[in-house]
Image: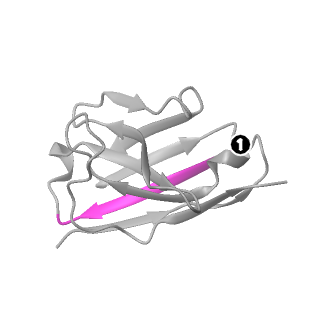
Amino acid sequence: QVRLVESGGGLVQPGGSLRLSCAASGIVFSAATMGWYRQAPGKQRGLVARIASGGSTNYADSVKGRFTISRDNAKNTVYLQMNSLKPEDTAVYYCNAPLGLTAYPVLGSWGQGTQVTVSS
């Protein structure tokens, strides 16, 4: 059974930083491409960063240069370091496993997500 548990969100001022974590179980984590998605109120969920099993990374243009995705295969955990946060980064953040270079999430379930609010 797949389980994804996101944590690390919170309220931060513009320009601040947060580090999100996602602990995964029920998958062969080391072989999986993992990604962080976000969903703002009234908007569709979208992929913001991905990391392949070999460590290569891709980012949405909106977060490039500010966010860094990483993984610890020994802990079955994927991280998202978010710096220089902007109000438009406010969203619920989720992890999943995007299919190849697409944004399609292959895992059949989502975690509860973690709320990130950027506001002064």
Q: Position of residue 78 (x, y in %)?
A: 37, 49
Q: Position of residue 72 (x, y in %)?
A: 33, 46
Q: Which residue in the structure is indicated by mark 1?
A: 86
Would residue 118 be found to the left or right of residue 27 on screen? right
Would residue 7 be found to the left or right of residue 77 on screen? right
- Residue at left offset 24%, top offset 42%: 33
Q: Which is more toward the observer, 84 or 45?
A: 45
What is the chief secondary structure element of the magenta stretch?
strand
Which residues are drawn in magenta? 17-26
- Residue at left offset 25%, top offset 33%: 101
Q: Secondary structure at mark 1?
A: loop
Q: Is residue 68 magenta?
A: no
Q: Which is more toward the observer, 6 or 37?
A: 37
Residue 86 sits in quarter: top right
Q: Is residue 21 magenta?
A: yes
The C terminus appears in which quarter of the rendering?
Answer: bottom right
Q: Which is more toward the observer, 45 or 12?
A: 45
The N terminus appears in which quarter of the rendering?
Answer: bottom left
Q: Position of residue 69 (x, y in %)?
A: 44, 39
The amino acid type, in three-letter code, at marker 1 is Lys
